[in-house]
Amino acid sequence: PAEGDTGPEPVGAELLVALPDRPGVLPAAAGVLALHRLTVRAADLRTVDPLGEGRVLLLSWRVAAEYGSLPQAARLRADLARALEGSLDVPARLAERERAHLGRAGRRGAGAPPPKVTVAPAGSRLATVIEVRAQDAPGLLYRIGRALEDAGVTVRSARVGTLGANAVDAFYVTGPDGAPLPPREAACLAAELERALGG
C-alpha cells in the first residue's frame, strides 16, 4: 500500500499511499510515520473514485527522518498493514514515545501556546474546513485524525504543513450525509478537537 523513495537521501522523501477509503486509514498512516520517527513537513490527502467501484484515499506525504536514515518502504507497508488490521497498537506505542519526548523536551515545550482550532468561514461549498494550529509534536497528526474520526466526520481532503515548530493544517470534512456540517455542529467539532488536542 505504500510506495516511496527509499534511497539514501538524508533530507527527506515523498511517500505516496493509496488505500481503499475506510475509517482509520488517516490516523493509522500518520501513526506509523510517527512511530518510524518521520516528521511530516507537508501532506495532501484526497479521496477519489477513479473507476466508479469505490473510493480510494490518496495520501502524499513529504517527510524527513528525525534521526538517521529513512526507513525502507517495505517496512512502512508492513507496519501500515498491521496498524489497519489491529495487530500494531499505535496508540500505546505513540504514548511511550510522547512520554519520552516530554521527558527530554518538557521544559522547552512548557511555554508553547495551546492548540487553536477554528472553522474557516466560506472555506468550501462542498465541505466544512477545520483549521488546526498547534506546536508540532510526535503523533500530532495521528491525534487529529483519530479525534476527527471519533467525532463521526469524514475527512474528504486535507492540507498539512509544518512551519518551524508549528503545524498549520486544514481538514475538509463532511457529515454522515456527505454534506458540509451545519454551523453549530462545525463550531462544536472545532471546540471538541481543540479539547482533545489540549489534553
Image (cartoon, rainbow, N blue to C red):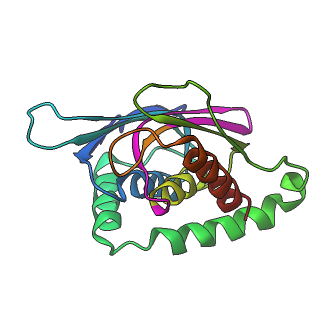
Q: Does residue 127 appear anywhere in the picture?
A: yes
Residue 78 quadrant: bottom left
Queried whether the magenta region covers residue 162, the answer comes back as yes
- x, y (%) of residue 137? 67, 51
- x, y (%) of residue 62? 48, 33
Q: Compared to 138, does 158 lie above or below? A: above
Left or right, 92 with respect to 113, comes to left
> Is 181 or 43 nearer to us in this picture?
181
- x, y (%) of residue 165? 74, 39
Characterize the magenta stretch by its predominant secondary structure.
strand
Q: Compared to 4, does 114 lie above or below? A: below
Q: Quadrant of the C terminus?
A: bottom right
Which region is colored magenta?
150-171
Queried whether the magenta region covers residue 96, the answer comes back as no
Q: Residue at x 33, y 73 (%)?
A: 86
> Is 192 or 93 nearer to us in this picture?
192
Q: Residue at x 50, y 59 (%)?
A: 151
Left or right, 127 with respect to 193, comes to left
Left or right, 129 with respect to 191, comes to left
Left or right, 167 with respect to 172, comes to right
Q: Does residue 66 appear anywhere in the picture?
A: no
Residue 106 quadrant: bottom right
Q: Compared to 123, does 6 lie above or below? A: below
